Each structure stands twice: as structure tokens, then as C-alpha cells.
Amino acid sequence: MSLEFSASNILWHEFEKNNNPSATVESEQLDKVKSFVNAFFQSHSRTCEAQLQPVSRWVNSQNLTFTTMLKKLVTQLEEQALVNDLDLVVLTHWTPDAEIGASVTNAIIYETGSHNAFGIAISDHGLSSGFVALQIIEDYLEDIGGDKRPRKALLMMADQDAILYDSPYLANFHPAASCCLLLLQSNATHEPHKVAGNITFKNYQKTSLPVSTADIYPLLSTLKMFSAAENALPLIILTSKSFSQVLQRDANFSGVRIETWDDALLSSAPWVLLKKLAQENTRFLLMMPEGKNMIFASFVMES
């Protein structure tokens, strides 16, 4: 089977920062949230205590829960595609939701009317969670696709610009509250031909981070991200600004087009850039270092 989507069915939105948070937040509410954060710290054997500023910032972001953000995009998607027949709804995120304990996937399943859909959330794979989500979606739709009919899934990414404690690492991204969704369709491999202009998901790989920059280019040939025929197509690498600078120091990448996404969009960033760059007869390779690993996802858009 193949997993495909149209660039027109990649929708995203960046929300304005709340630069003037409400001063009317009740102290009792803040105390409850601070107590929650302190319990979180204690459960992770951390001796620090909740600070008022990040807690207040997070409380004031609650008008932009993941559900609120994504419903805006679902409404737009319903204007251009049928979404009441989804088989799977997947949420991925890096930062926590502003609403603790909410089931975003259930809310979106109800919103779309896809009452037979299965919903899952992926929250422990960092900024590349959308990459592994595609592999999970492909595997799931293949498992339930015994009747060979096309299957549909909705992949959603969402992140907040505020979390419950100060994080210098997150601050380096200058984050924006943002969300993105992709409407995906699987087709049986025996079908003679894919929909022209659709982007096809090819492969997902997670490897150990190469020891040196010089090891990255040889690694790509071993991963088999594309077929032999697809390797003849022009390649565009999509990555973060910092990692693009690493690649550009290697002469092997001098003839490869490298584009960088907007880090502020967090989990949505790769998909926003893919939508912008989508063009026929092109290969796309999304690359991201995370900790001690390298994450890859490959796509092809044919005419």
C-alpha cells in the first residue's frame, strides 16, 4: 500500500502571542497549578519550585488549547474535503497542552463525525513525532485494510508557546502557538497508478547520530529512503537552520538543495515547509537530529 496526501490538504496556522495576559487570574487557580508543578518536579526528583511567571503565562494560554486550535483547521478542511469517514486520527505534539487531561483526538473525531475512527496521541518523540506518526499510520491502515478499499487518516501537530516552567531550551526556538494537519489516504499497491500531484510517503528511519559530519552523506545511501528509479529525481532536503549549516560544511552536499524550516513553529515546521516547496517530479528528505539520534522521513511527488 501507499500513503498519500495533497499539498492542498496540509493546513496550518500560527496564533498570535498573548503579550497582555489577564491580571484577573485568581490566586487560588495559580496556587493549584503551582502545586501541580511542584508535584511534577518532586516525582522527577527535582528540587526546584514552581515560579509564578511561567505558571501565569501558561494559565493565560488556556484560551488556545490544542482542541480549540485544531478545530479551526478542521473547519477549513471540511470546506475542501470529506472528513466524516476517517479511519484514524493521530495527534502529535512536543509541548504540553494548555488543558490537562483533555482527549484532543476524541474531540476531533466528534467534530468530524468520524465516529468509527480510532484515535491516538504521540507525545514522547520530540519535534520529530510527526515523522514516526506517518509510519504508525501506514502500518495501522495496512493492518485494517483487508478489504482493499482506500483508508483515510488525519495527522495533527500542535504546540504551545508557553509551558509550566522556564525552559531555556524551548526559549531558543522563540516558539509560537501553532498547529498543522494533514489529510492522508492509503491505497492498495496493486492499483495501477497514484493520483497525479499527490505527495507519497516513502520511508521513516531512526539511526544513531553519526560521529562526524563526513559520515552523514554515506549514511544516506545505506538507508534506502528512495527506490532506484526515484533516485533519479531532483532532491530537496528539509531541515532546521542549525543542521543545514552542518550539512553545508560538507562538500558532498554542495550540489544538493537544502531548505530550512521556521523553528518557531515547532512540530508543525517541517510540514509547513513541505507544503510551500511541493512540486512535481521531486524527492523530499526531512532530516532532524534529536539527542543521540538522527530522524529521517522521505517523500516523492510525481506528475
Image (tube, rainbow, N blue to C red):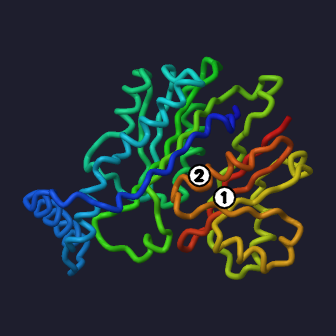
Residue drawn at x 7%, y 59% is 28
Q: Quadrant of the C terminus?
A: top right
Q: Amino acid at mark 2?
A: Phe
Q: Secondary structure at mark 1?
A: strand
According to the image, label 2 marks what residue? 131
Residue 240: x and y in percent read 63, 66
* Circle 2/circle 1 CB separation < 8 Å: yes
Residue 272: x and y in percent read 62, 50
Residue 284: x and y in percent read 76, 52
Residue 261: x and y in percent read 64, 60
User: Closer to the N terminus: mark 2 or mark 1?
Assistant: 2
- Depicted 254 relative to depicted 194: above or below: below
According to the image, label 1 marks what residue? 296
Q: Amino acid at mark 1?
A: Phe
Q: Quadrant of residue 42?
A: bottom left
Q: Residues within 10 Å of mark 1 (few under 14, many from 20)?
A: many
Tell me, yes or no, if residue 42 can be seen here.
Answer: yes
Q: Residues within 10 Å of mark 2 (few under 14, many from 20)?
A: many
Residue drawn at x 28%, y 65% is 164
Q: Relative to the observer, which residue lies in front, 167 or 143?
A: 167
Residue drawn at x 52%, y 24% is 83
Please give left or right for residue 85 compared with residue 138 in the image: left
- Which residue reaches farthest front? 20
